[in-house]
Amino acid sequence: MSAPLEIRNSASGKLFPALGPFLIGGIFGFGALQGVAAGTDGGHVLWIALLSLVCLALGAFIARGAFDTSVQVVLDSQGFRDRRAGDVLVPWSKVKSVWLVSGKGAMLNFELTGEPPDEIKYSAANAFGIMPFGRNTVHMEISSLDARGQDMVDAVRKFAPHVAVRR
């Protein structure tokens, strides 16, 4: 019995995307401070300050995942499970094929023999992690995880040799 592949969030995969909102929020915050110092109308400064806070909050929301060290995705001999969306086991017997999307493997697609479980289809997190696409295809976002896409495909080959690996 092979040890399961347990995948966690990548700190760089969560912090780098948060840099943009932090930078924009800082620029707007600096602009709001300059507006206050110059005696600009309070309404305009308030809007700029609120926009700054929204950008900073978005950056914090994105970056928070870098500090979550719990296991997000598990691939084992039983199937795959993504904690970000439903935390439901999809057995390998229901997986027909798997393939990587994007050059660096930002998305791992699973073609299922039937419809995805309801926990995946109706999960609030499916926009950020695993999501159904079409009738029988499930997309798993992997660019924010600490494993490369090819490592995950190799694990699928090891745990489920009957699953076709498409290119």
Image: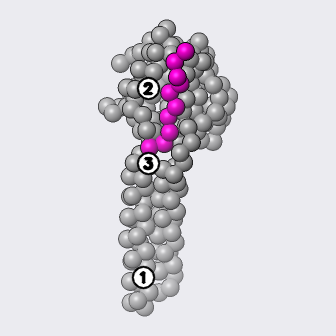
Which label was assigned to residue 33?
A: 1
User: Where is residue 31 drawn, in percent x and y?
Assistant: 39, 77
Horizontal placement of 49 versus 24: left or right?
right
Q: Residue 22's quadrant in the figure? A: bottom left
Is 9 magenta? The answer is yes
Circle on res. 152: 2
Of the two numbered discs 3 and 1 in the rendering, the one whose residue sits closer to the viewer: 3
For residue 144, side relative to residue 128 (left or right):
left
> In x, y percent, where is residue 69?
53, 45
Q: Height in image: 131 above or below 66?
A: above
The numbered mark, 2 or 3, whose residue comes first in the sequence reads 3
Q: Which residue is mark 3?
A: 11
Cα separation, mark 1 vs mark 2, equals 48 Å
Q: Amino acid at mark 2?
A: Met
How is the rendered protein coloured? Answer: one colour
**For the magenta stretch, what is the residue range?**
1-11
Residue 13: image location, x then y, percent: 41, 45
Q: Upstream in the sequence, badge 1 or badge 2? A: 1
Residue 142 location, quadrant: top left
Point 56% across, 24% down: residue: 80
Disc 1 marks which amino acid?
Leu
Secondary element at tag 1 = helix
Residue at image x 46%, y 74%?
A: 48
